[in-house]
């Protein structure tokens, strides 16, 4: 992607370790060529707004809502990806890992052929230059599902897959340690009576005990052989973390306790939490608060999860709410740290030689407004 050399002037630059007033220059290759304080130059006037790296999103399952906006309704997958991409880019996200499900509930509205259609649409959008952001694929693998290995085979030759997460939503552990929370969620979703709910829980637990350990190991082996990064998901105990370490896990997604987050962080994993958790002030599942982990120094990465705009808002909110976290530190949780965790060393900071993935942000009433988005020096939003 080529770009016209340009200067972004009168900006408040959020660098890796400091915030400065100045300018940023971009060369014709779409890479940052320098930062400084030139005077009397023509260029894009940021009007004093923040200029920061484009956000890097590792886990969003928001694409499904564009493809299946109502039960049994399917949208054109390429059009759905374009709609999703527009929302992603306008939220300041310039690199996104679109999470697609592998392993389904028996009565799920979407099946893995739908996931394959969405993957094809993402790749078509990339190939035909339809998309504003840079897209990769993240497979959310439900290890307790009977069809998870069969579904994974649909993606076996896909080079766009750069990350898999090993998930297990069996009642009574991880995200749903509290069966009360599990019952509230699923009885509301499926309309089960109390007796039906008890049968459902028992069957899920029996299914998981027979399938999850073997599926987890097989998927890990496949990912390692193909050079795909592995994320754990909803770890709650030291034993969960030890298992993740044994599977060569790089990212710890949404740990549900301080114990698991600290153990993951100490083991060198990047601890990822939901930006909505930060914005809302807590977990919707009643698990550990992302702010509590940030205060303990064990929060490394934020993900927008199900609300794209929350990623930018959460970064500014962390800096505002937690005295020990500076704005550059907070911004790193949504830029350079997720990029490094996944091995994308060419982006994530306002540094000469890196991609000019940039966003211009104005703060109004404590809420960030995205006023401009550039990917490799070309304006995309």
Image (cartoon, grey):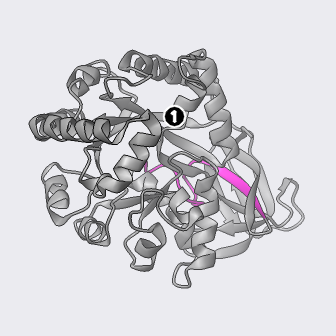
The segment highlighted magenta reads 343-363
Secondary structure mostly seen in the magenta stretch: loop
- The residue under the point 42% across, 46% down is 185
Q: Residue 162 in the image: state x and y as whole percent.
A: 36, 37
Report whether 306 appears left or right of 185. Answer: right
Left or right: where does residue 252 sit relative to residue 303?
A: left
Residue at image position (70%, 43%) is 90
In this view, 136 is above or below 261: above
Residue 235 image offset from top left, x and y in percent: 26, 57
Q: Would residue 215 be visible to someone looking at this image?
A: no
Q: Secondary structure at mark 1?
A: strand
Near-viewer residue (59 or 361): 59
Name the one closer to the observer, 106 or 330. Answer: 106
Q: Is residue 359 magenta?
A: yes
Q: Is residue 305 magenta?
A: no
Tell me the residue at 32%/22% (across/down): 155
x and y percentages locating residue 220 in the rendered image: 18, 39
């Amino acid at each position: 992607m080529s770009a016209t050399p340009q200067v972004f002037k009168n900006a408040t630059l959020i660098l890796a370790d400091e915030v400065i007033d100045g300018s940023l220059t971009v060369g014709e290759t779409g890479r940052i060529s320098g930062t400084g304080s030139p005077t009397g130059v023509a260029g894009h006037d940021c009007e004093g707004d923040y200029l920061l790296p484009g956000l890097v999103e590792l886990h969003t399952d928001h694409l499904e809502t564009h493809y299946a906006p109502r039960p049994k309704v399917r949208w054109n997958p390429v059009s759905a990806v374009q709609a999703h991409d527009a929302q992603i880019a306008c939220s300041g996200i310039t690199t996104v890992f679109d999470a697609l499900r592998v392993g389904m509930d028996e009565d799920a509205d979407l099946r893995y052929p739908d996931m394959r259609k969405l993957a094809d649409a993402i790749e078509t959008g990339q190939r035909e230059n339809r998309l504003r952001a840079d897209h990769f694929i993240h497979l959310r693998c439900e290890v307790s599902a009977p069809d998870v290995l069969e579904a994974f085979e649909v993606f076996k030759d896909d080079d766009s897959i750069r990350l898999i997460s090993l998930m297990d939503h069996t009642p009574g552990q991880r995200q749903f340690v509290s069966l009360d929370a599990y019952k509230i969620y699923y009885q509301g979703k499926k309309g089960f009576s109390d007796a039906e709910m008890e049968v459902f829980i028992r069957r899920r637990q029996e299914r998981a005990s027979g399938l999850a350990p073997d599926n987890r190991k097989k998927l890990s082996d496949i990912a390692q052989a193909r050079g795909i990064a592995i994320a754990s998901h909803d770890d709650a105990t030291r034993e969960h973390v030890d298992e993740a370490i044994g599977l060569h896990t790089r990212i710890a997604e949404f740990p549900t306790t301080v114990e698991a987050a600290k153990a993951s962080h100490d083991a060198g994993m990047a601890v990822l939490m939901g930006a909505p958790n930060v914005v809302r002030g807590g977990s919707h599942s009643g698990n550990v608060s992302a702010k509590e982990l940030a205060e303990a120094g064990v929060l490394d990465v934020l993900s927008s999860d199900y609300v794209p705009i929350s990623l930018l808002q959460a970064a500014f909110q962390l800096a505002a709410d937690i005295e020990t976290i500076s704005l550059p530190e907070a911004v790193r949780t949504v830029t350079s740290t997720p990029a490094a965790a996944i091995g994308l060393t060419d982006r994530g900071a306002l540094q000469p030689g890196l991609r000019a993935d940039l966003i211009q942000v104005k703060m109004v009433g404590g809420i960030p407004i995205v006023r401009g988005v550039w990917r490799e020096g070309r304006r995309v939003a």
